[in-house]
Image: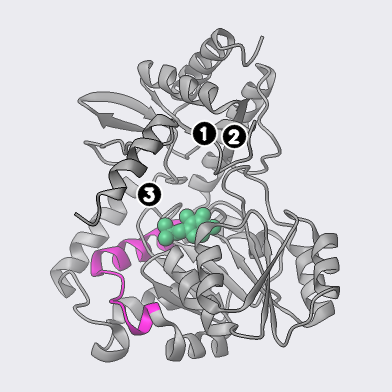
Amino acid sequence: MATEFLDGQLAELKEKGLYNTIRVLESAVDAQVTIGGRQYLNFTSNNYLGLANHPRLKAAAKHAIDLYGIGPAAVRTIAGTTSLHEDLEHKLAQFKRAEATLTLQGGFLANLATIPALVGDGDLIFSDELNHASIIDGCRLSKARVVRYAHNDPADLREKIRTNEYQRGLIITDGVFSMDGDIARLPELVEVAREFDLMLMVDDAHGEGVLGEGGRGIVDHFGLHGQVDIEIGTMSKAFGVVGGVVAGKQRLIDWLKQRARPLLFSSAMTIPDVAACSEAINVLEESDDLVKRLWANADYLKQNLRAAGFDIGATQTPIVPVIVGEAATAQAFSRALFDEGIFVMPIFYPTVPQGKARLRIMNSAVHQQAQLDRALDCLSAIGKKLGVIR
Ligand SMILES: *Cc1c(COP(=O)(O)O)cnc(C)c1O
């Protein structure tokens, strides 16, 4: 068989302890999940606001299925689109205080759709060295040359811009960096983009529903409406559903509708996804209660982890890295927590640098104080046993 070489590659991953086994959840995604018939406290998902199992989103999806069925059954540019999809795009534009938006099937695809539609051969992309894989892949597809600048460093970006030749240029940054939880220095990037007449794009996957007034995202957080050319977002994280979004000027969206390949050659979000996302916006427009609870929980956890002596890096968001050093320590820590009924993923090289292996604790609005306390107790006890803290 021509695929036999994979056996060797798989064996090698297992030997190195890099083989990833995907956990199977037997319940909805919530603060608690069921795995192998047992209950676990869940600190792994991007379900920041608890919307993945929210009664209003579920009801909206069911209702929409009764009216519109399930799938779009073809690509939108050929078979037409539903009024539900259009409504969601209008609502997203209003919510994000942008001129227009386009939805795609996911945030990953939103990057693949957008970057190659804007730059190509002869152009230059300036990309933060810690940008998400979907940005990296979108850049590759574009055939533009990519220059990586030092993480969140506008001075290095300026230097790289000055020392490179290009026709058209595009700066791309994550909004919130998902392994450290730090926030892009967007106001300074806006200045650089203006100074050199470059396009600026921010991927706000972890800021959507988290940053800004009522979860309106990083552009709202910094009050930069109309000053960032391209905002990428996802409805697969805080929105609790699945889907991607591009927001910007009407001309950007008009152009993407002509040229974005994942729109032209792949079917749209399904009806229940669209209806649930629309309801997620309704929930957020009505109240910022969930966003406030998310931040209160995150602050509580961060304060107590610091007090216990853990190194939680430079996080500014509800993503909390607990940096333990070696990959083996992170893995042992995660296993010991799992034995105690707490589900936390270890992250290590090559996802983060050598010696910076960590647990990555994802907070949500729906964790109860008692659940946070239990997690903190276990983290401290195991952290001491493993010599991570004293
Ligand atoms: C998660 C993530 C994506 C992918 O979003 P999906 O909707 O899951 O495809 C894209 N970009 C960034 C920065 C992300 O963190």
The residue located at (61%, 57%) in the rendering is: 131
Position in image of residue 213 (x %, y %)? 61, 57
Give the image quarter of residue 149: bottom right
Q: CA distance from mark 1 to mark 3?
A: 18 Å
Q: Is residue 263 left or right of residue 154?
A: left
Amino acid on which the number 3 mark rests in the picture: Leu
Residue numbers of the magenta segment: 262-284
The residue located at (26%, 61%) in the rendering is: 60
Position in image of residue 46 (x %, y %)? 45, 46
In the picture, the quarter occupied by the N terminus is bottom left
Q: Main secondary structure of the magenta part?
A: helix
Instruction: Please name which of the two marks, 2 or 3, marks the residue nearer to the observer.
Output: 2
Q: Which residue, given by chain and number where applicable, does mark 1 sit on? A: 361
Amino acid on which the number 1 mark rests in the picture: Ile
Q: Which residue, given by chain and number where applicable, does mark 3 sit on? A: 51
Q: Is residue 287 left or right of residue 309?
A: left
The residue located at (15%, 71%) in the rendering is: 69
Graded by Cα atoms within 10 Å as few (under 14), some (14 to 19) or many (20 or more), the crowding at tag 1 reads: many
Q: Are marks 2 and 3 in contact (CB under 8 Å)?
A: no
Q: Which residue, given by chain and number where applicable, does mark 2 sit on? A: 321
The residue located at (58%, 35%) in the rendering is: 320
Mark 1 falls on what kind of element?
strand
